[in-house]
Amino acid sequence: MSHRLLETADIPGYLRDHGHWDGSGEVAVHEVSDGNLNRVFIATGAGWSLAVKQALPWVRVAGPSWPLSPARADAEARAYRAVAAVAPETIPVVHGYDPADYVLVMEDMSDLRVLRTVLNEGGGYGGASDAIGLFVARLSFATSDFGMTSAERKALLAESVNPELCKITEDVVLSEPYLEHEHNHWHPDLADLAAAYRADAALRTEIAELRHLFMSGAQALLHGDLHTGSIIVGNRAGAEVVRVFDPEFSYVGPIGFDLGLYWGNLVAAESRARVLGAVGEHAGQLARSWAAFETEFRRLWPQRADTFFDDAYLDRFLRRVWADSLGFAGAELIRRIIGYAHLTDLDSLPDATAARHALLVGRELVLRRAELATPADVAALVDDLA
Ligand code: SR1
Ligand code: MG
Ligand code: MG
Ligand code: MG
């Protein structure tokens, strides 16, 4: 059954009927839809404001020709609930979820700024990488076999499926860029690398392994799309604020997928900064986010539900998460340059110099993820390919 699609004029009545507004005073509403999939409105009254996000039955940027179940909003609401239990300060306040119309009513964050936009304008990360490391550690530990009993985990696995959005990632991130596909596009100066990557058997097999890990490596509940456009930053009352939003791709998958998406976007931002003549701080941010993740994961380890997992296994597990993260970072870079959904970081530049650098780094991260042992190794790779 189809749901009611909200337009700007519908928002005040929707908020009143669902108990978010008492109906008094004036309300101004404007649409701020920006992501690829959904519609978002900001409603402002006297002394209050709210964000209203609705999932459409299709991909917003493609239109009805690309249908997509609005049940992705269920996955988003579920992810927010899971994070709220362990790291509430890292997400927006959710005032309500309406599963009949796939609507989330949330804190208005329009006083804050999307991290990608800040970086594109030459701004810095502040404490974003520390917050991301903490976010991934808290969410992943709590929803892994370390943070839950075996029975709780089976229930989580059963309720956290998100098949259509997983399939998008399996396609647009983890296969299409290596095939002839109508979704793919690239800067004309990158046609050589796009063709070379399609013909690269070693790269294809490594991507197949990452794709299989994404499909079968049910380690913990993920955000599922943790790029720099899913992070919002700023200051409130003199204190720094970092919030993660848009977890509609959330499902139970490999922890390295979340860290890897963030890292791929750090490298893209670094490639951009270099061609603009700035010495990027981005490589240092990879180290910072990993340190925050590892520190928090190790802090939580004594609380694990199953002590058969010993300390030596923790070391082995974290090494694997590190290498997986590098692989997914590489895949993220490649798909953002020769696949369907590109990055303003690179597309807004006058030529493809930065994109070429990021594309080359992406391939090396995928192929050499097992031998790149430290953040310094990654920083050296980024330098060597510049
Ligand atoms: C059709 S969706 C393409 C991309 O947009 C989302 O933000 C995800 O990154 C997805 O891969
Ligand atoms: Mg949604
Ligand atoms: Mg209703
Ligand atoms: Mg998004």
Image (tube, rainbow, N blue to C red):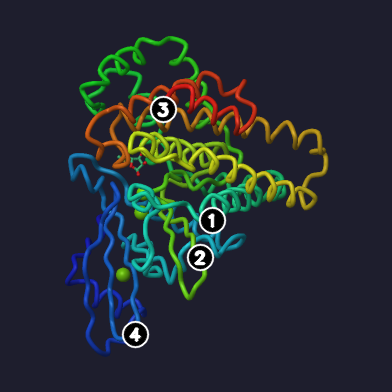
Quarter residue 270 falls in: top left
**Which of the two discs, 3 and 1, labels the residue nearer the N terminus?**
1
Give the SS element for disc 3.
loop
Question: Circle 2 sits on which residue?
Answer: 240
- Please state which amino acid type lies under the numbered disc 1: Gly
Question: Circle 3 sits on which residue?
Answer: 174
Disc 3, disc 1: CB below 8 Å?
no
Q: Position of residue 382 (x, y in %)?
A: 48, 28
Query: Mark 4 and mark 1: span between their CA atoms?
Result: 29 Å
Relative horizontal placement of residue 194, taking residue 222 as reference (left or right): left
Is the CB atom of the residue marked by disc 3 within 8 angstroms of ligand 1's nearest atom? no
Category of crowding for the residue at label 1, using alpha-carbon neighbours closer than 10 angstroms: few (below 14), some (14–19), many (at least 20) = some
Question: Circle 4 sits on which residue?
Answer: 47
Question: Circle 1 sits on which residue?
Answer: 127
Query: Mark 3 and mark 4: span between their CA atoms?
Result: 45 Å
Give the SS element for disc 4.
loop
